[in-house]
Image (tube, rainbow, N blue to C red):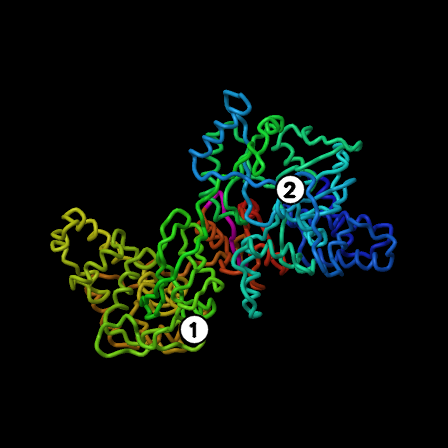
Amino acid sequence: MYDQSQQKALFDRTKALLTSEISVEEIEDVRDLLRYHEWKYYVENNPVISDFEYDQLFKKLQKLETENPQLITVDSPTQRLSQDTITDFTTVAHIIPMLSLDNSYNAEDLLEFDKQVRKLTEIEGDLEYAVEPKFDGGSIALLYENDYLIRAATRGDGIMGEEITANIKTLASVPLKAPFSKYGYRRVELRGEALIPKDRFKNINEAREKEGLVLFANPRNAATGGLRTKNPNETRDRGLEAFIFQFGYAEDNNGNEVSRNLKAHFSSIEMLGQLGFKIPHAEKKLCKNIGEVIDFCRHWEEKRDDYRYEIDGMVVKVNDVRLQEICGSTSHHPRWAIAYKFKAKQATSKLINVEYQVGKIGSITPVAKLNPVQLAGVTVSSVSLHNEDFITSKDLHIGDTVLVERSGDVIPYIVKAMEELRDGSEKPIVFPEFCPVNNTEIPIRLERVEGEAAWRCPNCVCGAQTLQKMIFHVSKEAMDIDGFGKSYVERFYELGWLKDLADIYNLDYDAIAGLEGFGKKSAEKLRSSIEKAKKNPISRLLQSLTIHHLGKKASKIVAEQIGHVLDLKNWKHEDFTSIKDIGPVVAENVYQYFSNEENIRLLEKMESFGVNLTQTDEDKPRAVNAEGALAGKTILFTGTLHTMGRKQAEELAEQHGAKNISAVSKNLDILVVGENAGSKLTKAQSLGSVTIYTEQEFLDLIG
């Protein structure tokens, strides 16, 4: 839409107008600049000025138009703001019906689709297909006449839809004016989807939770509801974006339909991108044959969770418009297009029971037991309910029909209970007063620390907590004992071979070799992994002890200050709090741990079995490069990096004098953005004080 020289000129002009008074003669210049910045932000996802600077320029235009109302134009950026409330949604007819799509669920379905298309078109060889995301939002139809947006409507029943023009005009990703006339089109109807990016949806729900409002179930519900709000400014505030993916209809200056003049679907979408509309880019592809289509669909099924928007499949379309005409349509769907549906991420199931698990620090976690349901390719029958507050906020009952969601490989999540389906037989979930895991005769009353959500068993005597501590201790996150998985820990614990952490380092490998399913080779491999773990730096050991709130970063900081782990038994509370970045909560927890004689005896026992308790070179603080290109700067990486991993990038930054931090705040100096940067980029831009670099700019900076 804009070439490089045009963009440079627009940027320079913006900076000039931000620092000067604007005359009436410059009013159209300001409008053009604002349209450009809307395009950069909402269509390209690559803003070049801060939100504050945009607002300043917008206010200057508002002031000029208020003083000179006769100069207001219908496509002015100020006209996206609505002063009116919609009292009713009128029904309008689409120029041509918005048909549904037939669905496919596997490669065999796509091969059958290709076979049918070749039969209809009488083509024996390969067919060219355009493949694009199937966005999970609200379908819209946009009508332009003489280059201006004159109407927007929902899909409705496909024949008639509700007019939502005022709401759609608030979306900065929808041009109020687009130069269709230069292609000879007087009247055009476009098809698209309005949706909310996943990171923005998360922020919306967090804000609603703070205000005590009902949370939206998913981005789709929030988007479709946002299209039909009575106040158009609420539509704008939800942050909807509109992707355009189809020319539905086109006519020339004489009123003749010229839709078939668009010879190919893929090139027509590219043309819409040039006209300023938001279209799919790397996530769409022109495929030479159905084999390429299948590969591309599978590729995006794997990547769907990394994408910024919710997609529930891919749409496959015959690229040649002439062949589309030959294929025709049924009353329900076009024969030249099909949706390849991804495996379901949401489903409903029955909550039949709640069981409880104890964690390594004694936290009691409720787990919902469901009727098994298929989600994203796996069978789900158990879902964590996190804590009592989660159960209360969702108003969950045993016997409820619940909506379950699963994204990628993450733990499934209960979105909500279907209250409207209750029949009175459901029972409220009552959180236990005493430890539900403890199997001794004396019940232990649960405790809840003020300010925390979890109930904990304060004095585990049944061994359940010890077992969880051992499972964590051997894990990759802690001592990283390769091959020593959860099942081994549980098996050795049941045999009585493991009673505490020290026993992990004093196993009888001959006895292990004699176990069913092991053998001498497996036992020796485990011995080798444990011997290697004994030499770990003490920062890993500290993290592996399950001291509440003492994570990886804090363990590293403490390890830098000591020569031997047992030095900490002589530390006072203020010795911990005097260390930068160690807060009072962590300090108190570490102090209490090393004040306990039983814990000291455990560590001495581990040392007697060969576990290293002495500071290693890896534990020692790194020398700060005071002369590096990033000396004294704080830095954060976000998005997907392509030339290196995140850890390597952070190490490079440290080598050149920077300090890595974990969040965007006023303390951040530099944000390095990769692909799909998301909410951290948006927040950094809003601060205005953060320098933003691409991955390549970062590499150039450090040489």
The x and y percentages for residue 368 are: 37, 63
Indicate yes or no whether the magenta region holds residue 640: yes
Tag 1 residue? 452
Q: Give the range drawn in magenta.
A: 633-644
What is the quadrant of residue 505 in the picture? bottom left
Callout 1 amino acid: Glu
Tell me if 320 is positioned left or right of 662 in this view: right
Gap between marks 2 and 1 measured at Cα: 48 Å
| Residue 694 numbered mark, or none | none
630 with respect to 359 (left or right): right
Residue 641 visible within the image: yes
Q: Nearer the viewer, residue 352 or 272?
A: 352
Q: Where is residue 463 in the image (x, y as percent from the top left)?
A: 23, 69
Q: Nearer the viewer, mark 2 or mark 1?
A: 2
Q: How crowded is mark 2: few (under 14 residues within 10 Å), some or many (20 or more)?
A: many
**SS at circle 1:** loop
Judge whether residue 1 can be spotted in this image: no
Q: Which amino acid does label 2 sit on?
A: Arg
Find residue 308 and report its horizontal and vertical position in percent.
54, 49
How would you rate the neighbour count of disc 1 (Cα within 10 Å): few for under 14, some for 14-19, many for 20 or more?
few
Report the disc number at residue 191.
2
Left or right of 604? Residue 311 is right
